[in-house]
Amino acid sequence: MKIRLLVALTIFMFFFKNSSAGNYEKVFYDFKIESITGEIINFDKYRNKVVLIVNTASYCGFTKQYSELQGLWDQYKSKGLIVLGVPSNSFNQEKKNDEDVKKFCEVNFNISFPLSSITEVKGRNAHELFKWAADNYGKSAIPKWNFHKILINKEGKVENTYSSFTKPLSIKIITKIESIL
């Protein structure tokens, strides 16, 4: 009976283990992405900073989170937080081109944090950054919907992930960011 219990507990723990202790042959700082204006954002310039990556979309029910993302950026950028918006049409809710997304974000939300060009965030065509996060942190790093959040620590590794339902200014996110800044 004890052996069965031990085996059952071991199997249970395997399914719920945190994948944050990934291989990390690369870290966040080894990647680049195209900005919404066409320049290359080299993540090496964010070394020793905390980064919150959020896949965004203009036509999503969570689009109002842009306001909280801007608030988070305003509150913590001087302390070393980078908010990085990654517009994506992976869920068929984004505008057709970068110029329209940029204008939408500026006019409706006065966004000043960095935005990438429209980028795939899941599946075979996902940007290598999102594949890396999934490989090193597990399934919770794969966006299930728009406004999924991936928090990168100062070592360039995935610290935690948050679903679309977790608001950017939630106690959960603020507490974690403050603890790793």
Image (cartoon, helix red, strand yellow):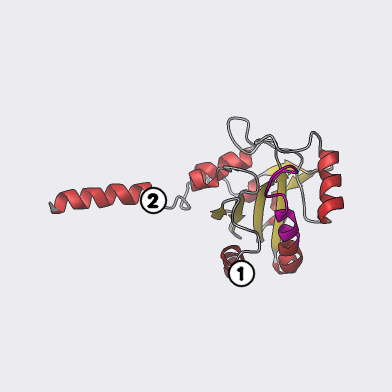
Percent from the top left, x then y, of residue 143? Answer: 58, 43
Residue in view at x 66 percent, y 50 percent: 54
Percent from the top left, x then y, of residue 38? Answer: 83, 40
Percent from the top left, x then y, of residue 41? Answer: 76, 46
| Residue for badge 1 | 178
Residue 38 seen in render = no
- 181 within the magenta span: no
How many labels were placed on the picture? Answer: 2
Q: Look at label 1 and name its amino acid.
A: Glu
Above or below: residue 133 compared with residue 172: above
Residue 17 seen in render = yes
Residue in view at x 17 percent, y 48 percent: 4
| Left or right: residue 92 compared with residue 176 | right
| Viewer-nearest residue: 3 or 78 | 3
Query: Residue reaching furthest front?
Result: 61
For the C terminus, the image quarter is bottom right
What's the magenta region?
56-70
What element does badge 2 sit on? loop
Query: Residue 123 sits in which quadrant?
Result: top right
Query: Residue 89 sits in which quadrant?
Result: top right
Q: How crowded is the residue under tag 1: few (<14 C-alpha within 10 Å), some, or many (20+)?
A: few
| Viewer-nearest residue: 172 or 124 | 172
| Residue for badge 2 | 16
Sequence-earlier tag: 1 or 2: 2
